[in-house]
Amino acid sequence: MTEALAYTDGAVHVRVPAKINLHLGIGPLREDGYHDLTTVFESISLYDELTATPAAGLTLTIEGEGEDTLPTDRRNLALLAAAELAAYAGVETGAHLHLRKRIPIAGGLAGGSADAAAALIACNELWGASLTPAELDKLAAALGSDVPFCLHGGTALGTGRGEQLHPVLSMGTRHWVVATADGELSTPAVYREVDRLRELGEGGYHDDVDALLAAIRTSDPDAMATALHNDMQPAAVGLMPSLKDTLQAGLDEGALAALVSGSGPTCLFLARDERHAGVLAKRLTLRRVAKAVHVAESPVAGAGVVGG
Ligand code: C5P
């Protein structure tokens, strides 16, 4: 976890990356409404930035992705995270949070969870609350299943509902093309579709990540391409059939592998190296199968401070 620094204007600036799942295995529906997961998270170089400044009360403004649609009250995970931290630490001063959002919303990249992680780190520093990493992890897990990973970043095996993290030895850098979609997919709706398909006997729980962990240790792109897997993909494609064409377009244009990111609808294409990713991104842009096409690399560090 990177330590935050306070600057002379009293503001704390935090940059937080999106996450992808190199493997997403979905277990059966639990009694608490969640699914057990076997997942391999990785942070990718698409970032949101959050600035926290001292203020009376708790307020939030947003620019960029979702600025016209996202709530700015406690329905927003960033503001809720700040409120939960204040309550836990007994902080009575407030903060104004300003979010510069680049991570597509409802895209399967954990943008909302990333913002919650950024708010925890920023407010812990701004208020001098001195919560330990273990305390931040606990608050993070209560906010959402992906929030603990967003605090830490890098590469990690996730179990439980995704909040239990285990270290993974990772070598080298992976290069991606990230294609966002016109439209959103609600994570609970995609989980419900996974359950519906399972009831029809379609799909199963893939919890073997040995080949993937070996590929991560060597960073061999061909081994990685074979090992990438997402149990949610058939459900996401079922709910948004245009994703099938997007995934196929990437393969036609030379991607080593194509998969839906998390619950989608963002699609990920693995490239051999940085140059290949650039070529692939240009070709996919010309195919007009995505709302926007980005090049990105993984793994990157989790939520941390940017220069003041
Ligand atoms: O944990 P989070 O609030 O991000 O989860 C949002 C929703 O996604 C949950 O309410 C649940 O419907 C679904 N979910 C799940 N199993 C998980 C994680 C999330 O069913 N492991």
Image: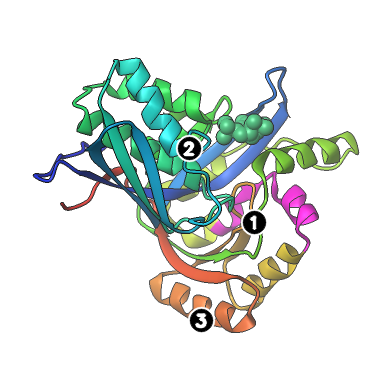
Q: Is residue 235 magenta?
A: yes
Q: Nearer the viewer, mark 3 or mark 1?
A: 1
Residue 282 badge = 3
Crowd around label 2: few <14 · some 14–19 · many ≥20 (10 Å): some
Residue stretch rendered in magenta on the structure? 225-241
Is the CB of the residue bearing disc 1 within 8 angstroms of ligand 1?
no
Query: With 244 as the anchor, is 44 left or right in this view?
Result: left
Q: Please name the residue shown 72% across and 51% down the image.
A: 236
Identify the element where label 1 is drawn: loop
Q: Regarding ligand 1, which quadrant of the image does it lie in?
A: top right
Q: Position of residue 128 (x, y in %)?
A: 18, 26
Kindly identify which residue carries mark 2.
Answer: 73
Q: Report the residue at 60% width, 47% height from top.
A: 262
Does the CB distance between marks 1 and 2 fall below 8 Å? no
Query: Which amino acid type is marked by label 2?
Result: Asp
91 relative to 119, above or below = above
Is the N terminus in the top left, top right, bottom left or bottom right quadrant? top left
Between residues 134 and 102, which one lies in front from this camera angle?
Answer: 102
Dot 1 corresponds to which residue? 265
Asked whether 223 or 43 is in front, the reply is 43
| Foreground of the two, 218 or 302 | 302
| Vertical position of residue 264 compared to residue 71: above or below | below
- Residue type highlighted by circle 3: Lys
x then y, percent, for residue 303: 32, 42
Q: Residue at x 15, y 39 (%)?
A: 6
User: How packed is label 3: few (under 14 Cα within 10 Å), some, or many (20 or more)?
Assistant: some
